[in-house]
Amino acid sequence: MSHATAIPSAISAPPPTARRKGSTSFGDAVFAGACTAAGVFVLLLLGGIIIELFIGGWPAFRTFGAGFVTGTIWNPVDEVFGAGVSIYGTIVTALLALMLAVPLAFGVAFYLTELAPPWLRRPVGTAVELLAAVPSIIYGMWGFFLLAPIMAQTVQPWMIDTIGELPIIGALFQGPAFGTGIFTASLVLAIMVLPFIAATMRDVFQQVPQVYKESAYGLGATTWEVVRGVVLPYTRVSVAGGIMLGLGRALGETMAVTFVIGNANRISTSLFGSGNTIASIVALEFGESELGSLKLSALLALGFILFVISFLVLAASRFLLRPKIGS
Amino acid sequence: MSASTLSHTGPGHSARDPKTAAALGRRRKRVDMLVRALCTGATVIAIAFLISILGLLTYRGFAAIDLTLFTTSTRPPGSGGGLLNAIVGSLIQVSIATVVGTPIGMLVGTYLAEYARASTLGNIVRFVSDILLSAPSILIGLFVYQLLVVPFGGFSGWAGVVALSIIIIPVVVRTTEDMLRLIPDTLREAVAGLGAPKWKMIVLVCWRSAISGILTGILLGIARIAGETAPLLFTSLGNNAFTTDLSRPFPSLPLSIYAYAGSPYEDWIALAWAGALLTTALVLGLNILARAVLKVRI
C-alpha cells in the first residue's frame, strides 16, 4: 500500500500535448491491426490445413465412400485403398505407448515434486525435458539400430516364453521375434511422449496448495498417502489432460514409427507383428505416388483422418487442462 | 471416493490395539518405501533412455566425423563425400523460416496477451495456436504440398521454408504470450500514465521486459524446426548436390539422415550417424542455451 502515496506526484506532471494525439492513434491502429491480422492468420492456417487435406482426399472419399475408413485392403496395383489397417495401427500403438508411458511419467513427476533433493531437481528435470527435444528421426535411428536388435534377440524371445504362455493375453505376445513391429513402435513412442506427460503432471502437482499437503502430513500420512489422497484427487482432471496431450503426440508421430514398425499393411494378432500407422504409410508411400493419382488422394485422405483424430484428442486435452491453469 | 483413501491412515478403527497399530504403521511405511523406490526407478529409466540415445549417437557419430564431412557434398556410395550440401541447406532453410515465422508468432502472442486476453476471438486464436503446437508436423507438410508444390510445379526449398515457418509460429506464440502475461499491469499503467501510446508501451516496455523469455521461445522454436523431417519430405524433398537455389529440390540434414540411414551402404549409414550427431548436438545445445537465457535474465 505504501507505493500508492507516490502516484499523485506522477499525476501532477504536465499533461501530454494534444498535438501528438493524431499520430498516436494512427500508430496504435496500425499495430493493433497487425497483431489482430496475425491472430486471424493463425485461424486461416488451421482452416487451410483442413480444407486442403479434404480437397486432396476428396477423390478417395468419393471413390470408396465410408468404406475407406473401414477397408483393410491397400493395393496400389488394383487401386483399392482402405484406411482400416493404418487407423488400427495408429490407435493401438498410441494406446499401448500410453500404457507404458503413464506409469513412468507419474513416477518421474512424483520423484521430481516430492522425492528429489532440491539440488537434483533442476538437472533431472532438464534431462527429462531434453528427452522431449530429441528429434523424431533420432528416435527412429536409435530404435532401429539399437532397440530393435535387443528386442529381437533378448526381450521378445523372453516375453514369448513367459507372457506368451498365459491363457488369454498370451496370443498378443506370440509369433516370430522380428525386433521391429507394433510393440517396439509403441515402446519408442512411449519414451517420446513420456516427457510431455511428466512435465504436465509435475506442473500441476506443484499447483496443489502447500497447506493441503501439510495438513495430510500433519495427520501422519506418508508421502505416498499424501500424493494418493491429496495430490492426485486435486489434480486428476489436469493429469487426464496431460495424458491426452501425450496421446495426441503419439498419434501423429511419424519418423520414429516409420523406422521401427515394420511397415506391413496387415492387422496382426500378435503385438510383435509388423503393422503401419497413418503417419508412417503416408511418409513411406508418398514418394511412389504420382501427381493426380488415386493413391496420392488416398494418402491425403489419410492425412485428413489423422487431422480429425488429433484435433479431437488435442481439443479434449486443452479442455481438461484449462480450468486449473486459469484459476 | 478418493477422500476415503486417507481414512485408514488416521487413528481409530481397530488400530486402537497397540500391536495392530504398530503392524499397520510398518505396513504403511513399507508401501511408502516401495512406491518411492518405483518412482525413483522410473526416473532412472527415463534418464537411462536419454543416456542410451546420446551414447549411441556419440559412439556411432564421432567415428564418422572428419573434415571432409564439412567440406564436400554427398558422392555416390563408396567414393567418400560429406554433408556440406545438407548442412548449408539446413542452415539456409532454418534461418529463413525463423526470420519469417518469428515476427508472426510474436505478433500473435502480443495480440493474445495485450489485446484479446478474454475476447472470444482471442480465445479461439489461443485454442487454435495450441492445437497447431501439438498437431502432427507431417500434416503441415501435406498442407504445404497441396498449397505450393502441386500448383507451382514441383518440390522446392521455398516450400520447405514455408512448412518450417508454420511450425515455428505456435512455439513463439506460446512463450511470447506467457512471458507478456508475467509483466505486472502496474508497469503498463505507469507507461500509459506517462501518455505513451499503446504500441510504444508494448514495443518499448513490454517486449523489452519480456525479451529473455521471448528469446527463449525463439531458440526453442529453432531447435524444434532444426530436427523436423516429416514436413520436408513432401516439400523440399532433398538433394544430393550442393545448391543454394531455393526454387529447386533442396537438401537438409534431417532429409539426408533419413535417406542414408535407410540405405544399404556402410559409408552412407556412417554419414547418417554423423548427421544425426550434428543435428542432435545443435537441437539439445539450443535447448540448454534457451534455459540458460531464461535463467540469467529473470
Image (cartoon, coloured by chain):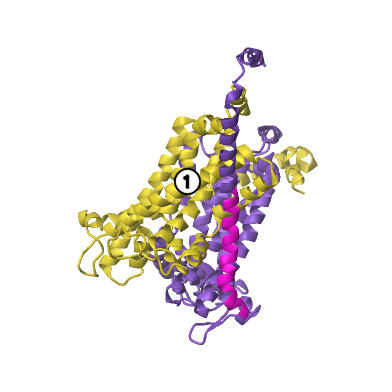
Residue numbers of the magenta segment: A39-62
Q: How many marks?
A: 1
Q: Residue at x 47, y 68 (%)?
A: B151
Among the 4 quarters of the image, the one containing residue A72? bottom right
Local SS, label 1: helix
A303, B29: nearer the viewer? A303
- Left or right: B61 in relation to A207: left
Q: Residue at x 46, y 72 (%)?
A: A286
Q: Residue at x 56, y 40 (%)?
A: A30
B294, A38: nearer the viewer? A38
Among the 4 quarters of the image, the one containing residue B154? bottom left
B86, A277: nearer the viewer? B86
For residue B138, above or below residue A115: below
Q: Position of residue B134 (x, y in %)?
A: 55, 54
For residue A24, above or below residue A88: above
Query: Mark 1 belongs to which amino acid?
Result: Thr
- Left or right: B43 in relation to A326: left
Q: Colour of chain A?
A: purple
Tag 1 residue: B102
Disc 1 sits on a residue from what chain?
Answer: B
Q: Position of residue A133 (x, y in %)?
A: 45, 50
In the rendered image, residue A40 lying in the magenta stretch gets the answer yes
Whether residue A63 is visible here, answered yes or no, is: yes
In the rendered image, residue B170 lying in the magenta stretch gets the answer no
A255, A28: nearer the viewer? A28
Q: Main secondary structure of the magenta part?
A: helix
Whether residue A107 is visible here, answered yes or no, is: no
Q: Position of residue A243 (x, y in %)?
A: 61, 54
For residue A173, above or below residue A218: below
Which residue is most to the bottom?
A78
Label 1, residues with CA under 10 Å away: few <14, some 14-19, many ≥20:
many
Q: Colour of chain B?
A: yellow
